[in-house]
Amino acid sequence: GAGVSQSPSNKVTEKGKDVELRCDPISGHTALYWYRQSLGQGLEFLIYFQGNSAPDKSGLPSDRFSAERTGGSVSTLTIQRTQQEDSAVYLCASSLDGTSGSYEQYFGPGTRLTVT
Amino acid sequence: TQLLEQSPQFLSIQEGENLTVYCNSSSVFSSLQWYRQEPGEGPVLLVTVVTGGEVKKLKRLTFQFGDARKDSSLHITAAQPGDTGLYLCAGGTNQGGKLIFGQGTELSVKP
């Protein structure tokens, strides 16, 4: 079956431009997560959606970052007025259930964002 | 703020050697997961431990969750070049499915 897919795989943008990153989770998974990873580092939590509940936005680094999940499936992470420090790999994950941290998260391959 | 300190950050060893990676915190976690990530790919789950003192074995890999559920370790016996990758620990919180990740251990096993 299909895993988590993300697009684009690479994105180069100029400082100040807006970017949209897309995530298609595994069908039937109720929880969807966005993380940011700098080169060779751990994952920084950004936001997660669980079913119809209000998303946990506690990891978003600034108000330039926002995300939405339409129809409980596809999610888009938007970064407005990009800055060079936004350069990183953005990873999306989904899990069958997001009510506890014991459920396996399935990750997409990530979008590598470079802000010039 | 819950934090997970992972050590060592880098590890370069010869094939056949044993190694241990540590994940420590001052906070209690509801569960502890270990993931492995290869370049250009997302992390893949290796194991989940949920009970204090729990030990799980996966072939040459042994995972342990501390009695107080504040720390965990990953031990690899007779490492092979195929074990090369970034190993990440992640703690389950009391905030639904949210995980707190450690900084990762970059393991290189040379033939």
Image (cartoon, rainbow, N blue to C red):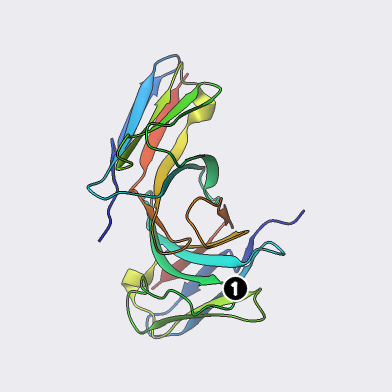
Residue B29 image offset from top left, x and y in percent: 35, 49
Residue B76 image offset from top left, x and y in percent: 44, 23
Q: Please report the residue visible at 52 percent of the width from the left and 62 percent of the height from the top.
A: A99
Residue B4 image offset from top left, x and y in percent: 29, 48
Q: Mark 1: which amino acid?
A: Gly
Nearer to me, B71 or A41: B71
Query: What is the chain letter for disc 1?
Result: A
Residue B82 image offset from top left, x and y in percent: 54, 28
Nearer to me, A101 or A91: A101
Q: Please report the residue visible at 77 percent of the width from the left and 53 percent of the height from the top.
A: A1
> In the picture, residue B32 is in which quadrant?
top left
* Quadrant assignment for the C terminus of chain A: bottom left
Neighbours of disc 1 within 10 Å: few (<14), some (14-19), many (20+): some
The image shows residue B89, relative to residue A95, as above or below, that is above
The image shows residue B99, relative to residue A47, as above or below, that is above
> In the picture, residue B53 is in which quadrant?
top left
Give the structural element (helix, strand or loop) at label 1: loop
| Residue at the disc numbered 1 | A51
Residue A24 in the figure: left or right of residue A65: right
> In the picture, residue B64 is in which quadrant?
top left
Q: Please report the residue visible at 22 percent of the width from the left and 47 percent of the height from the top.
A: B26
Q: Please report the residue visible at 45 percent of the width from the left and 63 percent of the height from the top.
A: A35
Nearer to me, A65 or B66: B66
